Amino acid sequence: MDVLFERPALERFVQLATELLAVPVPDDPKADLPRLHAPAI
Protein backbone atom coordinates (compact mmCIF):
# COMPACT_ATOMS: atom_id res chain seq x y z
CA MET A 1 0.00 0.00 0.00
CA ASP A 2 1.36 3.42 -0.98
CA VAL A 3 0.50 6.65 0.79
CA LEU A 4 1.18 9.87 -1.06
CA PHE A 5 1.34 13.34 0.48
CA GLU A 6 1.64 16.69 -1.19
CA ARG A 7 4.95 18.28 -0.27
CA PRO A 8 3.49 21.21 1.77
CA ALA A 9 1.36 18.80 3.81
CA LEU A 10 4.33 16.55 4.56
CA GLU A 11 6.51 19.54 5.48
CA ARG A 12 3.80 20.78 7.87
CA PHE A 13 3.48 17.33 9.43
CA VAL A 14 7.24 17.15 10.01
CA GLN A 15 7.22 20.66 11.51
CA LEU A 16 4.41 19.79 13.93
CA ALA A 17 6.04 16.47 14.88
CA THR A 18 9.34 18.25 15.57
CA GLU A 19 7.62 20.83 17.78
CA LEU A 20 5.71 18.14 19.64
CA LEU A 21 8.83 16.07 20.32
CA ALA A 22 10.58 19.18 21.69
CA VAL A 23 7.92 19.76 24.38
CA PRO A 24 8.91 18.24 27.74
CA VAL A 25 6.45 15.80 29.30
CA PRO A 26 5.57 16.56 32.95
CA ASP A 27 6.98 14.18 35.58
CA ASP A 28 3.59 14.00 37.30
CA PRO A 29 1.41 11.51 35.36
CA LYS A 30 -1.74 13.31 36.62
CA ALA A 31 -0.63 16.69 35.26
CA ASP A 32 -2.20 18.05 32.10
CA LEU A 33 -0.15 17.41 29.01
CA PRO A 34 1.23 20.42 27.14
CA ARG A 35 -0.90 21.70 24.28
CA LEU A 36 0.38 22.84 20.93
CA HIS A 37 -1.51 25.57 19.11
CA ALA A 38 -1.23 25.42 15.37
CA PRO A 39 -1.80 28.65 13.48
CA ALA A 40 -4.76 28.76 11.15
CA ILE A 41 -3.79 28.13 7.57
Image: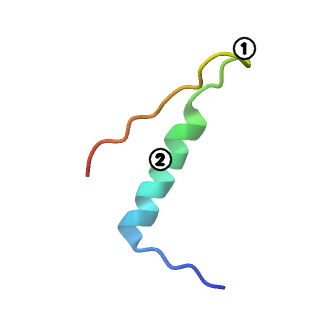
Question: Is 31 located above or below residue 18 in the figure?
Answer: above
Residue at image position (53%, 45%) is 18
| Disc 2 + disc 1, Cβ < 8 Å | no
Residue ranking furthest to the left:
41
Give the mark toward the camera: 2 or 1: 1
Give amino acid for label 2: Leu
Q: Which residue is mark 1?
A: 28
**Residue 6 location (% of width, % of height):** 40, 74
Mark 1 secondary-structure assignment: loop
In which quadrant will I find the N terminus?
Answer: bottom right
Number of other residues with Cα within 10 Å of mark 1, as a class: few under 14, some 14 to 19, many 20 or more: few
Relative height, residue 37 to residue 6 (above, below): above
Residue 4 at x, y percent in the picture: 51, 79
Q: What percent of the width, then of the height, locates residue 13? A: 47, 56
- Between residues 11 and 41, which one lies in front from this camera angle? 41
Q: Using the numbered discs, state the Cα–Cα distance from disc 2 to disc 1 in whole angstroms.
A: 24 Å
Q: Classify mark 2: helix, strand or loop.
A: helix
Could you tell whether 16 is left or right of 39 in the image? right
In the rendered image, the residue lying farthest to the front is 30
Residue position for label 2: 16
